[in-house]
Image (tube, rainbow, N blue to C red):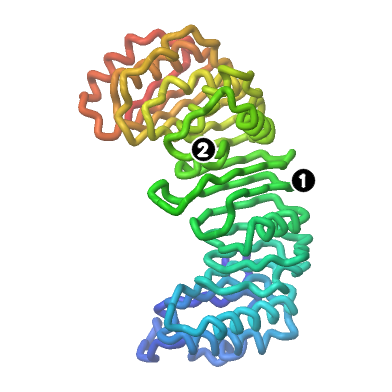
Amino acid sequence: MDEDGEKHVLTKRSSSPELSDKRSGDEGDWRRIPEWRHLWKYVPRLDLDEADFTQFDTLVSFIDSFLSVNRESSLNKFKLRIYCNHDRDKETNNAHMARWISAIFEQNVQHVDRTWLPVEVPPILYLCESLVTLRLCGVVLANLEFMYLPLVKVLALEWVIFANELALEKLISGCLVLESLSFCKCSLDNVNVLRVRSQSLLSFNYYGPSSRDLHFKDLVVTIDAPKLEILKLSHQANIKVEFNFCVGKKFNPNDLSKRKMILHFLVAISRVKNMTIAASTLEIIYDYSRCEPVPLFRDISLLRVEFYQDRWEILPFFLESCPNVKSLVVESDYYTKERTSILSRPRRLLSSLEYVKIKSSWDKLEMKLVSYFIENSPILKKVTLCLDGCSRKESVILRELLTIPRLSSSCQVVVL
């Protein structure tokens, strides 16, 4: 049984139908239990991995048998992972997929998790009125005239190949009560414009391809989700997603269309509660702020900033747009340069900030950053410093920290 008390078939290498029956005693083969020969066929969940079968044909036979026996009953979840094999016939694989999807469609399946590279998903799946969770990885999605998934709340798309951008847009808009959307882009997915339009969406996670992917082009992202509370953008995505800039391109204040696009994006995400953002994204927002006022992010409580460049000094300006942020996590993998022009300017008090965590190497600029938080946060409770590859001794850093005047008398500083 799983954690919620429901039985389901879960294959493992140690209990695969393909393994020999040489185990004995207390560790005997569970398939020898007489009742199991029949009961396993009626469990409401199926979780299979191709790696647990020595032959692909055996996996196909197993699934066909299971779905055939369960034809008259309901299937709660169907999870299947099949990996790319160029030796197999594409049409045969598509036929297997179509047959199994049609079967679980008739069984009112609620949760589908499918990894199969690169097999077409039959259209009937996108008309499943019982489906609540849909996770697809590596599959191919055709451009259908109509998609209707009235109960889907969770949609996760990883390395999916779409016929075109419209196919993806129809899939998202066809999920009428969608609450969580996760999209992992690949260079061959045929998506240059990602349109996220949902009146019910609460969480959106975007994972971009590696910055080393030479086939990746600019991606325009438009978000129309008035209830959005959580937005997470991977560090690979950073500027590419939000503002349609490639690495190396700079913000042009005279480009009115780009300024308008950035404003619409910021307004669309202004109600999020938790945000993960890259330094390069902050840099664009900062450049934009010199032309237009940045909307306030009044609902942000947790802000995680991932720095991969030398722009520590742009953080304070963005914090002024987050008047209610309580927790801040700052991460960096690179040594920063001595750039303190913005940090040295007078700043407003961080009246809501309670917790700060900095995970990085260490230099003089970071001490200035810590000083900024400690000296300008009246209710700050704790500052945690995680020193990665620090060349200076912890005792030296602690002595420097003790010299910083604290605005909050209850503030604790912890060095890890």
Nearer-N-terminus badge (1/2): 1
Q: Residues within 10 Å of mark 1 (few under 14, many from 20)?
A: some
* Residue 127 drawn at (x, y percent): 76, 69
Examine the rendering and report whether any part of residue 24 can be seen: yes
Of the two numbered discs 1 and 2 in the rendering, the one whose residue sits closer to the viewer: 2
Residue 263, by quadrant, is top right
The disc label shown at residue 245, or none: 2
Q: Nearer the viewer, residue 62 or 178?
A: 178
Is residue 266 among what the camera can see? Answer: no
Residue denoted by label 1: 199
Q: Nearer the viewer, residue 227 or 404?
A: 227
- Left or right, 51 with respect to 201, comes to left
Residue type at mark 1 is: Gln
Which quarter of the figure is the C terminus placed in? top left
**Foreground pick, 285 / 330:** 285
* Residue in the image at 63% along x and 51% along y: 181
Residue 279 position (above or below residue 6): above
The residue positioned 45% from the left and 74% from the top of the image is 84
Q: Residue furthest front?
A: 254
| Relative to 365, 130 lies left or right | right
Percent x, y of residue 175: 74, 57
The amino acid type, in three-letter code, at marker 2 is: Phe
Q: Residues within 10 Å of mark 2 (few under 14, many from 20)?
A: many
182 in relation to 26, above or below: above
Quadrant position of residue 308:
top left
